Image: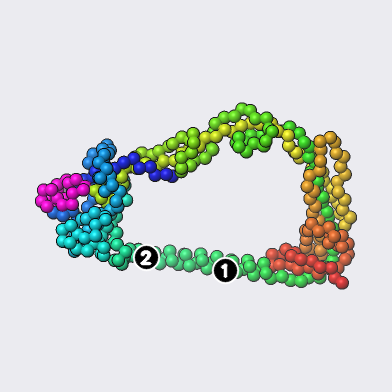
Amino acid sequence: MARKVLGYIELVWTCDSCGTRNPGAIKSCTACGAPQPIGVKFEKVDPDTFNFIKDEALVRQAQAGPDKHCPYCGTRNLAEAETCIKCGGDLTVGATSRPSGVILEDDAVPPQPQKTATQPEVAPQRKPLPKWALIVIALVLLACCVSGVVYFTRMSQTDQLDATVTQTYWQRQVALEAYQLVKANDWEDLIPPNANIYDCQLRHRYNSDTPVQDATEVCGEPYTVDTGTGFGEVAQDCYYEVYEYYCTYDTMQWVVINTLVEDGYGTNAIWPSTSLGMSQRLGTPTERYTITFTTNSGEYDYSTTDYNLFQQASQGSDWVIEVNGFGDVTSISREP
């Protein structure tokens, strides 16, 4: 979602010492002279309106970044200042930037002042999880580990068994396709060339965070963001609804009209017999062969698409098969 800046407004702050409301850009109370506290909360002059600043110098000040407080006397200075306007202290080391980024309409609690990179930050203390929650998490992790070990162990564990072929089954399929007129729907840019297009309607296709030609801009309610300068940035969250033509069309395509199937038992498989008409063709054929083995521990089925291997599986022939821990046949080989 795109963020759209509408303009900047002046904010006010309330003096902790005497309760006087002061313009946001003023660095000390106009009534008692008390310095503006670091964590003071800025508010809108009028909660229901946006009186945008017209003065370009004030707009640049609002865009300059949050003001910072002198580490020696606490005086508030502009973001680009390198020495304190009151005591002359060095602001390049240890200055504390004013809180910023709070949405005033949310009536949120101001964030704690952000220290400059020269001062180490103290990580917030997190409330530890209760003992029972730690035990549950540990048990769940242990169960997952055990299940994973069991699964991979059974997958990798294979047994070689002497086996005899007791049954063979095959199935072969061929799709029968016809070149005919079909009716379909799609976005205009995805319709095949030479198609007969009709009945097109504008439909919402997707949303974009950036402007798109002929798109509809949709914006939320304006809100004010505390910039930490005594001014508020008025913004909206917007996106663009993109509408494009969705059409019905007629076109000639190859369409599956039937699937021919042939199956049976034994090792001599055949393909389905076909008789093609005009504007017809055969699609991609598929084949599947199943060999049933009998061992001392039971019966196992093995499926393959290798017809040459299948033809070797004559009934009564002896093989060696590998079976994993789940009872699946992973490989077969003919006994010499």
Instruction: Find the magenta span and give its range.
Output: 15-33
Could you tell me which secondary element the residue under label 1 belongs to? helix
What is the crowding at mark 2: few (fewer than 14 residues within 10 Å), some, or many (at least 20)? few
In the rendered image, residue 118, in percent from the top left (x then y), is placed at: 30, 66
- Residue beneath disc 1: 146
For this orientation, the residue located farthest to the left is 32
From the top left corner, tell me how far across and down residue 137 is, in percent.
47, 65
Amino acid tagged 1? Val
Nearer to me, 318 or 333: 333
Numbered disc 2: secondary structure: loop
Give the residue type at disc 2. Answer: Pro
Q: Which residue is mark 2?
A: 128
Q: Is residue 39 visible?
A: no
Determine which quarter of the picture holds residue 194.
top right
Q: Is residue 263 above or below residue 181?
A: below
Pick whichever of labels 1 and 2 is earlier in the sequence: 2
- Identify the residue shown where x is 76% and y is 68%: 322
Rendered-image quadrant of the C terminus = bottom right
Residue at x 49%, y 36% (from the top left corner): 213
User: Which of the colour schemes (rainbow, by chain, secondary structure, one colour) is used?
Assistant: rainbow
Q: Residue at x 67, y 35 (%)?
A: 193
